[in-house]
Amino acid sequence: MAVPKRKMSRSNTRSRRANWKAQAVNTVACDQCRSPKLPHTACGTCGTYKGRTVVEV
């Protein structure tokens, strides 16, 4: 197991932790109704996926 030989400085620790941030959810427009939806999933508004109806809404 890797163990650091020296104590990491406060500025190095904080700059490393600064990159741990939440990202916004990536959405795409539905092909049928143009409402925002998650990529590679069926649309929650119209129930289509890749141009065909897969979920009855």
Image: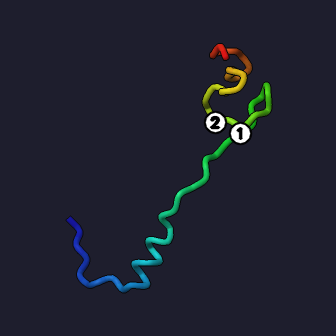
Rendered image: mark on residue 28:
1
Disc ID at residue 44: none
Q: Residue at x 65, y 13 (%)?
A: 56
Q: Which residue is mark 2?
A: 39
Q: How many marks?
A: 2
The quadrant the N terminus occupies is: bottom left
Residue 30 drawn above or below residue 4: above
Quarter of the image with the C terminus in it:
top right
As measured in the structure, the alpha-carbon distance from the residue carrying label 2 to the one carrying label 1 is 6 Å
| Mark 1 residue element | strand
Query: Percent x, y for residue 53?
Result: 69, 15
> Which of the two discs, 2 and 1, labels the residue nearer the N terminus?
1
Compared with 7, 29 (above or below) is: above
Q: Which amino acid lies under the numbered mark 2 shown in the image of this protein?
A: Pro
Residue 35 horizontal/vertical position (percent):
75, 34
- How crowded pointer 1 is (Cα within 10 Å; few <14, some 14-19, many 20+) is rated as few
Q: Residue at x 33, y 82 (%)?
A: 8
Which residue is drawn at the image coordinates 67% and 35% (left, top)?
37
Q: Disc 2 on helix, strand or loop?
A: loop
Q: Quick one: which residue is furthest to the left in this view?
A: 1
Tag 2 near tag 1, CB within 8 Å? yes
Task: Measuring from the top left, give residue 31's x and y in whole percent.
Answer: 77, 28
Judge left or right: residue 12 versus residue 51.
Answer: left
Which residue is depicted at the point 61% across and 52% down?
Answer: 24
| Kind of residue sitting beneath label 1 | Val
